[in-house]
Image (cartoon, helix red, strand yellow):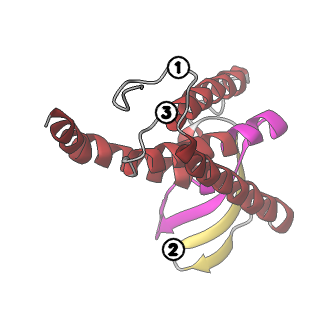
Amino acid sequence: MPNPQEKKGLFQFYPHNLWWLGLTIVSIILDQWTKWIATTSLNYADPVPVLPFLNWTLLHNYGAAFSFLSDAGGWQRYFFTSLAGVVSVIFVFWLMRMPKNMKVLPLAVALILGGAIGNLIDRVSLGYVVDFIHVYYQNSHFPAFNLADSAITLGTILMLIDTFFLEGKRNQQQAK
């Protein structure tokens, strides 16, 4: 009889992790739906006030986060598309192999994966990422972003929490 503590092979997955892939799919659908609403309802670069610190402003991001490398000449589209594709495949394998007792790390990976794929869909189909959430305070403006960026950010924060606060506890429990 196999020992449940043994590591599984590279292509063996835990079926319970399909729930986390479901969350990934939901985040992709919400991201693409809100980008569709922004694209069909907003005029490019024309802010629509929502709150005293928030506008809906349709913008196209040809670079990475905060428009990094957006004016690099076009090669960045293929670089970021390839990078997101490779990272997404790695994250799917990682997510599907996580033990059932883990909750925060698979949530983090599912959100990062959903955000990466949401923005990847834009890069492949449009050549840019659709951004529309514009937060500001007086004359200080945060770069526009979208739900995929929000999922990536939240997932990264959760991953850091898991790494710095929860991983040590897991390791102590496994050592007992």
The residue under label 1 is 10
Residue 143 among magenta residues: yes
Label 3 – label 1 distance at C-alpha: 8 Å
Q: Nearer the viewer, mark 2 or mark 3?
A: 3
Asked where in the image residue 160 lies, by quadrant, the reply is top left
Q: Which residue is rendered at x = 33% and y = 30% of the image? A: 5
Mark 3 touches mark 1? (CB < 8 Å): no
The residue under label 3 is 97
- Kind of residue at badge 3: Arg
Residue range of the region highlighted in magenta in the rendering:
119-147
Which disc, if any, is residue 53?
A: 2
Question: For numbered disc 1, what is the local secondary structure?
Answer: loop
Mark 2 touches mark 1? (CB < 8 Å): no
Q: Assess disc 3: are there few (<14), some (14-19) or many (≥20) residues with their C-alpha within 10 Å of its C-alpha.
A: many
Q: Assess disc 2: are there few (<14), some (14-19) or many (≥20) residues with their C-alpha within 10 Å of its C-alpha.
A: few
Q: Is residue 44 above or below residue 71?
A: below
Q: Is residue 3 above or below residue 24?
A: above
Residue 93 in the figure: left or right of residue 155? right
Q: Earlier in the sequence, mark 2 or mark 3?
A: 2
Confirm whether residue 45 shows in the render: no
